[in-house]
Amino acid sequence: MFSRAIGIDLGTANVLVFVKGKGIVLNEPSVVAISTRDGRVKAVGRAAYDMLGRTPDSVEVVRPLQNGVISDYLVTEAMLKAFIARAVGRFSMFKPKVMICIPAGVTSVERRAVRDAAMQAGAQEVFLIGEPLAAAIGARIPVDSPTGSMVVDIGGGTTEIAVIALNGIVEKASIRVGGDKLDQAIVSYIKRKYNLLIGDRTAEELKIRIGSALPLDPEEELTMEVRGRDQVAGLPRTIEVHTNEVVEAITEPLEQIVGAVRKVLERTPPELASDIIDRGMVMTGGGALVKHIDELLTQVTGIPCFVADNPLACVAMGTGMALENLEVLRDSLSDD
């Protein structure tokens, strides 16, 4: 009666926390700053993210989640502890019930690591839900009907594709390609073409501000000034980057995402495939915000594709809504 129910989207790039009755109360980068001398946590979330690429030797900034799974258990635990305390109040007497989303393709060891980290961080009870199912619930797709629905969730570390019917995942694919891989592709492209070294944060800004999944006409193209370090001279330099250069840079990772979508469609039972043709597929996650990515998927598959309302928040909202419908969804939740 007194315990809080909170849903957590434990993402590679961002952690979102949903509290029942309040909505999304926290949206912070999955970044932790640690002292290299004694291992103390110096900052978590936005404060740590602002330190990226600017720290002295005494501070290290780490992302404890890689490709949607825990790569550093202790740091993840410290991060979860800080975020749960912020969500429920530091002096709350009652431990919260927590629903956490996990990528569809994780192993039982990786699942247990997430569960244990949440328990150690102060949860009373932990439930795990597949990311595509949470995304579909958060996007208000009727997951309980026998009619098939398809969701494509492009996160920071993974892309989750699933066909959902009757509260469960019928077909799925999880590939370790997401927003971070798009950023890395932009960094490599700028380095190769201009001999200029830029950071991941600059690459992410390029992707968000002028990026596109499809080439634009010259008159529609956007440009952005980019500052970095010249590889030859070793000095700072500024260049101007165009939209179609970003399109060229991210072609390869986008092809991998499109290939995974096609594979799931090929394996989908015919009855559900006809439902998907009628209803289209829904895109969620930060990657869905790349301009024209829905058009790219429609072109390749011939199936209408829509970006969900507030795609960044769909998974977090889905975890919270799943907690409210626990009895209905219990069979679909991940066990150890």
Image (cartoon, rainbow, N blue to C red):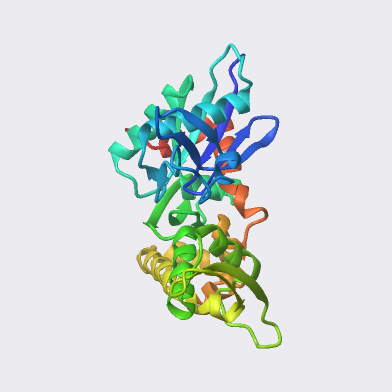
Report whether 207 appears left or right of 76: right
Q: Residue at x 58, y 24 (%)?
A: 85
Can you see residue 91?
yes
User: Residue 74 in the image: x percent, y percent?
Assistant: 38, 30
Can you see residue 144?
no
Where residue 227 sits, quadrant-wise, is bottom right
Total marks shown come to 0
Q: Residue at x 50, y 60 (%)?
A: 199
User: Residue 9 in the image: x percent, y percent?
Assistant: 53, 41
Name the outermost residue toward the bottom: 218
Where residue 319 sits, quadrant-wise, is top right
239, above or below 178, in the image: below
Q: Residue at x 46, y 24 (%)?
A: 121
Q: Nearer the viewer, residue 56 or 210?
A: 56
Q: Nearer the viewer, residue 46 or 40?
A: 40
User: Residue 77 in the image: x percent, y percent?
Assistant: 43, 29
Image quadrant where one finds the N terminus: top right
Report whether 39 appears left or right of 8: left
Q: Residue at x 47, y 58 (%)?
A: 180
Image quadrant where one finds the C terminus: top left
User: Residue 299 in the image: x percent, y percent?
Assistant: 53, 79
Q: Nearer the viewer, residue 74 or 133?
A: 74
173, above or below 133, in the image: below
Q: Nearer the viewer, residue 123 or 166?
A: 123
